[in-house]
Image (tube, grey):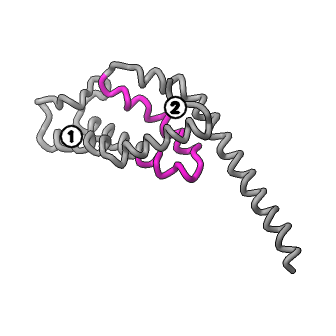
Amino acid sequence: MRRTLLPVAALVLGLTAAGCSSEQETYCQAVEEHQPELTDIAASAEPGAVLDALDAYRDLREQAPDDLRDEWTQVVTRLEALRGALDDAGVDPASYDPKVTPEELAQDDRRAVESAARALGETATIKAMGGIEQQALDVCGTPLSQ
């Protein structure tokens, strides 16, 4: 009986590793495809340029291997919250500067925008993005942006 289990276990491990490899390859390909866009966004001096990365980040979250989904969800959720708060307040994300909240905003809108901006800068979100960037370098051999 033991002799039968060993080949089965080896087969299962082999199939699992092959699945991870394929998943990883798909993700790494997506990282490479989004790199030029993310490089342009990272180099932008435009206020709120990080919000332009949202579609690329959503795609990368969808392509990410299971061990990165939580990190991508953290980052994407925080960006979506900021975009939503800005949209609800009627603030153009292209002109948004997190250091200056427009004076004409209603108190509730101002609080929502400031809260979403603070949440984006929380340690958990920064750590998640750091883990994502490190994984792109270590596993894919490609930074998210150059």
- Would you identify the image quadrant in which residue 78 lies? top left
Which residue lies at the image location 85% right of the left edge and 78% below the top edge? 2
Q: Quadrant of the N terminus?
A: bottom right
The residue stretch that appears in magenta: 47-74
- Would you identify the image quadrant in which residue 137 lies? top right
Q: Name the residue that disc number 1 marks.
A: 114
| Drawn side of residue 117 relative to residue 15, left or right | left
Which residue lies at the image location 48% right of the left edge and 23% below the top edge? 39
Q: Position of residue 7 (x, y in %)?
A: 85, 67
User: What's the CA distance linking mark 1 and mark 2?
Assistant: 27 Å
- Give the vertical position of 30 relative to 69 (above or below): above
Amino acid under disc 1: Glu
Dot 1 and dot 2 residues touching (CB under 8 Å): no
Amino acid under disc 2: Leu
Which residue lies at the image location 54% right of the left edge and 31% below the top edge? 143
Q: Name the residue that disc number 2 marks.
A: 144
Label 1 crowd bin: few (<14), some (14–19), many (20+), radius 10 Å: some
Instruction: Determine whether the residue tagged by mark 2 lies in a helix, strand or loop.
Output: loop
Q: Position of residue 71 (x, y in %)?
A: 46, 48
Label 2 crowd bin: few (<14), some (14–19), many (20+), radius 10 Å: many
Q: Nearer the viewer, residue 81 or 120?
A: 120
Q: Position of residue 73 (x, y in %)?
A: 45, 48
Answer with mark 1 or mark 2, whichever residue precedes in sequence.
Answer: 1
